Amino acid sequence: MMDKIINIAMDGPVGAGKSSIARAVADRLNILHLDTGAMYRAVGLTAISRGVSVNDEEAVSALCKEITLTVEHHADGQHTLVDGRDVTGSLRTEEVSMAASRVATYPGVRAEMVAIQQRLAKTTSMLVDGRDIGTRVLPDATIKIFLTAQAEERARRRYVQLQEAGASDTFEQVLEDLRRRDDQDMNRKTDPLRVAEDAVVVDSTDCTFEQTVERILMLVEERIREKE
């Protein structure tokens, strides 16, 4: 089934479980789950290490053109390299996280990252999840999945996670924050969240994690058979 390169685009609103579902699906198919966030983290880390202010949009955008950022698929997951140096182990600090959030807003940086992702898609079977994958990053993906769930259910799942982590947020606060982020994602000027015309909508509101994974695997297998 996997003789040819396949690219799976998975989009959806915050709290839909995209990352965990995507990781499980990619593992079952033995393909790369591309962590695009790690790529922005690598840019932020490089800016910090080279003394470039992450608030300087022009300088950070120029830095993106100077470096060579690559991604490799290893048994333990994605490895992110900058100029041939593996920086995977340095990407999860709070400082790098904040830097990544900043640089990811710059159109010049986003354009460079999308170009890298599109080049990778030509040679590597992978699943990419995000907000604009099917509409911008991989418009010619083998299959596009739009993973969603009702806002109340997404908020409930997030609330449970926060409770387990010891957070004091109320369910109402979590739901309000989720709806605010939905509004921001759907109404932002650059690449707003929307369902691609040829995407398959998967609503996980009444599904378990495993049921959702199995549903997506079935859809992928059906699409691959159609293209053979």
Image (spheres, rainbow, N blue to C red):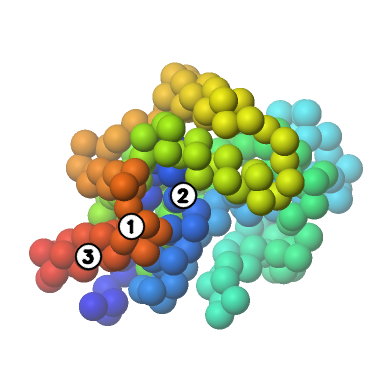
**Which marked residue is nearer to the observer: mark 1 or mark 3?**
1
Residue 130 % position (x, y)? 46, 45
Indicate the secondary structure of the residue bearing disc 1.
helix
What is the spatial separation of the Cα atoms under label 1 and label 2, in whole angstroms?
10 Å
**Quarter residue 148 falls in:** top left
The residue wearing badge 2 is 17
Work out whether mark 2 precedes mark 3 in sequence or the reverse, and give the earlier one: 2
Residue shown at the point (21%, 60%) measured from the top left? 219
Q: Mark 1 or mark 3: which comes first in sequence?
A: 1
- Which residue is under mark 3? 218
**Residue at mark 1:** 212
Residue 51 image point, x, y percent: 88, 43
The residue type indicated by label 1 comes to Thr
Q: Quadrant of the N terminus?
A: bottom left
Badge 2 amino acid: Gly
Q: Residues within 10 Å of mark 3 (few under 14, many from 20)?
A: few
The answer to the question of whether label 1 and label 2 lie on touching residues, with beta carbons closer than 8 A, is yes
Q: What residue is at 50 percent from the left and 39 percent from the top?
A: 156
C-alpha span from label 1 to label 3: 10 Å
10 Å crowding of disc 2: few (<14), some (14-19), many (20+): some
Q: Is residue 186 above or below residue 109?
A: above
Residue at 86% x, 50% y: name it.
49
Q: Can residue 225 be seen at all in this image of the molecule?
A: yes
Quarter holding the C terminus is bottom left
Relative depth, front residue between 185 and 176: 176
